[in-house]
Image (cartoon, rainbow, N blue to C red):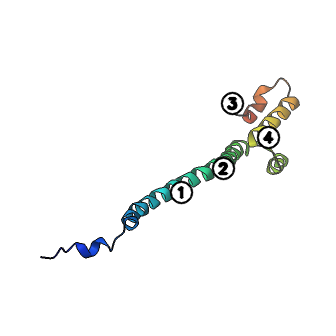
Amino acid sequence: MANIAAPFVGHRSVPALAAPRAERRKPTLKLFGYGIAFLIVAAMVLPFARDVYTRHQVMQRLWPVLSEQDRLSFRNWSGDAISFNRAVYARCLLKHPGEAAACEALQPPV
């Protein structure tokens, strides 16, 4: 009886047998690379998203209290929203000395 496996011994070489393992590792490394890329992008976007969210919160709270001139100055404000809120609150305290209740709606968050 002839050995059936004999023709296949020379057909497959050792590097060809190692190829499926390397192919199995590629998707794992690819997913790892995607994960690292996602973390880098998230780290870059997070400060901007936080600033946009803070601006939105400050505007939600101050919009009914601010005058039209203050609203325009907020749109042109180059700093963050909390610093604008502090500036408006400080201006209110200078305008109404001794009347903290008049400026309570403008008080910045802690």
- Front-most of 95 and 90? 90
- Specify which label sits upstream in the sequence, 4 or 1: 1
Q: Which residue is mark 3?
A: 110
Residue 48 picture location, percent across and down: 69, 49
Amino acid at dot 4: Phe
Which residue corresponds to mark 2?
A: 44
Q: Dot 2, crowdedness within 10 Å: few (<14), some or many (≥20)? A: few
- Specify the amino acid type for callout 1: Tyr
Are circles 3 and 2 on residues that touch, CB within 8 Å? Answer: no
Q: CA distance from mark 3 to mark 2?
A: 26 Å
Whole-number angstrom distance, CA of label 2 to CA of label 1: 15 Å
Identify the secondary structure beneath mark 2: helix
Measure how far apart labels 1 and 3 are at the Cα level. Answer: 38 Å
Q: Label 4 belongs to which residue?
A: 84
Residue at screen point 83% across, 32% down: 90
The mark that comes first in sequence, 2 or 4, is 2
Residue underneath mark 1? 34
Residue at x-position 45% and y-position 60%:
27
Say few, some or many: other residues with alpha carbon within 10 Å of mark 3 (under 14 / 14 to 19 / 20 or more).
few
**Disc 4 to disc 3, how far (Cα)?**
14 Å
Which element is circle 1 on?
helix
